[in-house]
Amino acid sequence: MDLQYLPLTVDEVPVEKDFLIGETYSFRFLYNDRTDFYTCTILDPDGNILFITKILYATPMIDSVVDGLNINRKILPLNPQEIEQASILQGQVVNRASLGSTILLLLGNIISS
C-alpha cells in the first residue's frame, strides 16, 4: 500500500511548514508538554489563522467547512499498521511517543470540487 503523509517528526516540533494540498498553507505544529498532546494551526499565505485543532488519533484534522481553507485531501492521524482497528482507537490523543514514529498524518484521496 502506497500511503502519502505530511512529513513530521517529534524532533522538529515546534515547527511551521508549508504544504501544497489543493493550495499552499502553512501548518504550525505545537506540543503541549503539560498534558502531552499536539495542536495544528493552519494559516493562509498572509499569516492569518484559518483553523486550529488538537491532533487526535483516527480523527480527521479538519472536521468542518472553513472560509478560505480549500484543502482537497483529508488529513488523518493514523498508524498505517492499525488501519483496520482505527475506528476502535479513534479520538485518542496523539502524543510525543507516537507522532512521526508510529502515527503519521496520512493524506486521503484528492477531493474534487
Image (cartoon, rainbow, N blue to C red):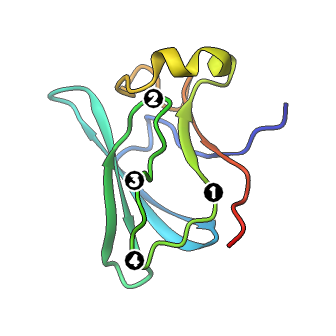
- Looking at the image, which residue is at 39% across and 33% down? 56
In percent of width and height, residue 51 lies at 34, 63
Query: How many other residues sit within 10 Å of disc 4, few (<14), some (14-19) or many (≥20)?
Result: few
Discs 2, 1 touching: Cβ within 8 Å: no
Secondary structure of the residue carrying tag 2 is loop
**Dot 1 surroundings within 10 Å: few (below 14), some, or many (20 or more)?**
some
Q: Residues within 10 Å of mark 2 (few under 14, many from 20)?
A: many
Name the residue tied to disc 3: 15
Q: Nearer the viewer, residue 38 or 84?
A: 84
Question: Which residue is labeled 4 in the image?
Answer: 67
Disc 1 marks which residue? 73
Instruction: Find the distance from the CA under tag 4 to the CA under tag 2.
Output: 25 Å
Query: What residue would you read off at disc 2?
Result: 57
Q: Nearer the viewer, mark 2 or mark 3?
A: 2
Q: Residue at x 72, y 45 (%)?
A: 4
Q: Amino acid at mark 4?
A: Asp
* C-alpha distance separating marks 2 and 1: 17 Å
The one nearer the camera, 90 or 53, is: 90
Q: Are marks 2 and 3 in contact (CB under 8 Å)?
A: no
Q: Earlier in the sequence, mark 4 or mark 2?
A: 2
Give how far across and how far down residue 70 sits, in percent: 54, 72
Image check: 61 left or right of 37? right
Between discs 2 and 3, the one toward the N terminus: 3
Instruction: State left or right for residue 73 relative to residue 28.
Output: right
Disc 4 element: loop
Quadrant in the picture for the N terminus: top right
